[in-house]
Amino acid sequence: MSWSRLVLTLARRALVRIHEVASRRYVSPYHFAYVHTGLGENDLAIDWLERAVHDRVPGVHGVKGSFLFQSLRDEPRFLALLRSMNLESRAPGT
């Protein structure tokens, strides 16, 4: 198994585990967004970030500068989310 395939397999297992834990107790939508971003599932990641904003999850305002969400920085929905939080970037990718 290649390294990248192994990492994706582990990330998918982590996602399953997070869903299992969330069935018993609260798990921040932010955590789901982390994993979906890592899997390259940008639309799902942004769905979870939107939920985090809606739920007023502590720390969600750090998404603009977080390296964890760097791959989302040019996504129109991510930019719209930043605007909704008054965190709009000056230009895509910044």
Image (cartoon, rainbow, N blue to C red):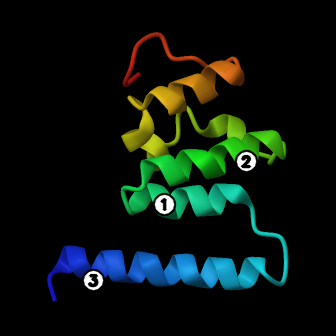
Q: Amino acid at mark 2?
A: Arg
Q: CA distance from mark 3 to mark 1?
A: 16 Å
**Residue at left 56%, top 45%?**
46
Figure quadrant of residue 67: top left
- Would residue 1 be found to the left or right of residue 52 on screen? left
- Residue 51: give its label: 2
From the viewer's perspective, tell me whether residue 49 is left or right of residue 34: right
Query: Tag 2, which secondary structure?
Result: helix
Which mark sits nearer the N-terminus, 3 or 2? 3
Residue corresponding to mark 1: 36
Displayed quadrant of residue 12: bottom left
On residue 82, which mark appears? none
The answer to whether residue 44 is above or below residue 21 is: above
Tags 3 and 1 touching, CB below 8 Å: no
Residue 25 is situated, as x and y percent measured from the top left of the image, at: 85, 78
Residue 81 in the image, given as x and y percentages of width and height: 62, 29
Callout in the foreground (3, 2): 2
Callout 3 secondary element: helix
Q: Is residue 59 visible?
A: no
Give the vertical position of 17 relative to 76 (above or below): below
For the residue marked with disc 1, what is the amino acid?
His
Considering only order in the chain, which callout, 1 or 2, is on the residue closer to the N terminus? 1
Q: Residue at x 48, y 47 (%)?
A: 43
Find the distance from the CA under tag 3 to the CA under tag 2: 29 Å
Is residue 60 placed above or below 94 in the rendered structure? below
Q: Give the mark nearer the N terminus: 3 vs 1.
A: 3
Name the amino acid, label 3.
Leu
Pinpoint residue 78: horizontal percent, then vertical percent: 52, 32
Could you tell me residue 9's position as x and y percent? 35, 82
Which mark identifies residue 6? 3
Q: Which residue lies most toward the left here?
A: 2
Give the residue furthest to the bottom. 1
